[in-house]
């Protein structure tokens, strides 16, 4: 296990996801509003909005909250002008980190991100300073119960995906960035709606990290995730299961 998924697992074990439900809703509302503003308010004709609505369902967001966010975005009243920005840098132990944000104030967000890096032994870099260490790929995740592992693998191959990994909790399908839309649409028709569907940054290689550096890195990532402006955080670290258990305790 490595990088972003490993960090998420640590946070889950700590029970932080329940404690941050309001934060999750805030991030989802921004994505819903932005998706509706950038495209049509009809999810059938707006894949990004469709994915945001599905993510909101998974998070158990009330339908009226979802509808209000979409209406605000579709209204184009200028009150919710969020800009997509990306930050890159290095964390403790030389771990490469990519931060994706939706913000209505670049100066505020840049200051928060820079502080998270600098206060935890990291350093914020220029755009593309670490992106070359990652591949930009499509990721479509389905609940385990939606199909058997064999059926999902067959559907993924038929859709033109690169790989499909199944576990007791979910099926993860990955594909090239260029094929993302086609693969997502084909899988929706074949097996149903995914839990999530988005472009992600996948590390090409991972950096082993342990001890104090691992603890400080997780603290830094947690601070970044805690920001309302930050949507996703990716990192190329790897922690052993023993070390993971210590951090989660």
Image (spheres, rainbow, N blue to C red):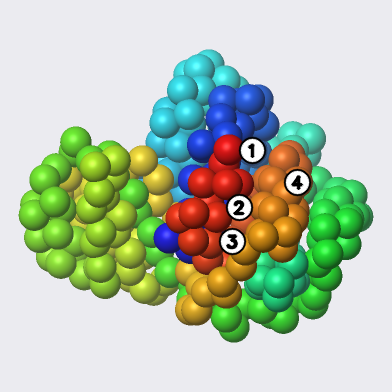
Please give the name of the residue rendered at 61% of the width and 52% of the height, measured from the top-left corner: 232
Marks 2 & 3, CB-CB < 8 Å contact: yes
Q: Picture coordinates of residue 40 (x, y %)?
A: 50, 43
Instruction: Identify the element where label 3 is drawn.
Output: strand
**Residue 234 marker:** 3
Which label's residue is closer to the chain start, 2 or 4? 4
Label 2 vs label 3, nearer the camera: 3
Pick the residue in front: 143 or 53: 143
Query: Could you tell me which secondary element the residue under label 1 belongs to?
Result: helix
Circle 2 or circle 4, nearest the eye: 4
Q: Which residue is mark 1?
A: 27
Going from N to C along the chain, the mark reached first, 1 or 2, is: 1
| Residue 244 seen in the current view | yes
Q: Position of residue 74 (x, y in %)?
A: 60, 36
Mark 3 closeness class: few <14, some 14–19, many ≥20 residues within 10 Å: many
Looking at the image, which residue is at 48% across and 40% down? 52
Q: Which mark lies nearer to you, 1 or 2?
A: 2
Mark pair 1, 4: CA separation: 15 Å
Question: CA separation, marks 1 and 2?
Answer: 10 Å
| Residue corresponding to mark 4 | 223
Relative to 196, 218 lies left or right:
right
Q: Is residue 231 left or right of residue 195?
A: right
Give left or right: position of 22 versus 150. Answer: right
Q: Nearer the viewer, mark 3 or mark 1?
A: 3
- The residue shown at (56%, 30%) is 15
The residue that disc 2 covers is: 232
Dots 3 and 1: beta carbons under 8 Å? no
């Amino acid at each position: 296990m490595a990088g972003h998924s490993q960090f998420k697992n640590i946070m889950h074990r700590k029970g932080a996801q329940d404690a941050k439900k309001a934060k999750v809703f805030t991030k989802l509302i921004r994505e819903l509003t932005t998706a509706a503003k950038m495209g049509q308010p009809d999810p059938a004709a707006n894949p990004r909005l469709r994915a945001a609505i599905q993510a909101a369902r998974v998070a158990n967001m009330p339908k009226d909250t979802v509808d209000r966010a979409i209406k605000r975005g579709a209204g184009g009243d200028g009150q919710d002008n969020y800009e997509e920005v990306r930050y890159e840098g290095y964390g403790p132990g030389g771990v490469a980190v990519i931060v994706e944000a939706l913000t209505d104030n670049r100066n505020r967000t840049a200051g928060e991100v820079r502080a998270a890096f600098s206060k935890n032994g990291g350093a914020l870099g220029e755009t593309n300073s670490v992106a070359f260490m990652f591949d930009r790929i499509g990721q479509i995740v389905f609940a385990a119960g939606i199909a058997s592992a064999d059926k999902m693998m067959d559907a993924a191959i038929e859709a033109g995906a690169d790989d499909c990994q199944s576990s007791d909790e979910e099926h993860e399908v990955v594909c090239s960035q260029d094929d993302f839309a086609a693969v997502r649409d084909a899988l929706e028709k074949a097996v149903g709606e995914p839990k999530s569907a988005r472009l992600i940054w996948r590390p090409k290689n991972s950096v082993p990290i342990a001890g104090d550096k691992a603890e400080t890195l997780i603290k830094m990532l947690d601070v970044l995730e805690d920001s309302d402006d930050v949507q996703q955080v990716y990192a190329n670290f790897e922690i052993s299961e023993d070390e993971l258990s210590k951090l989660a305790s």
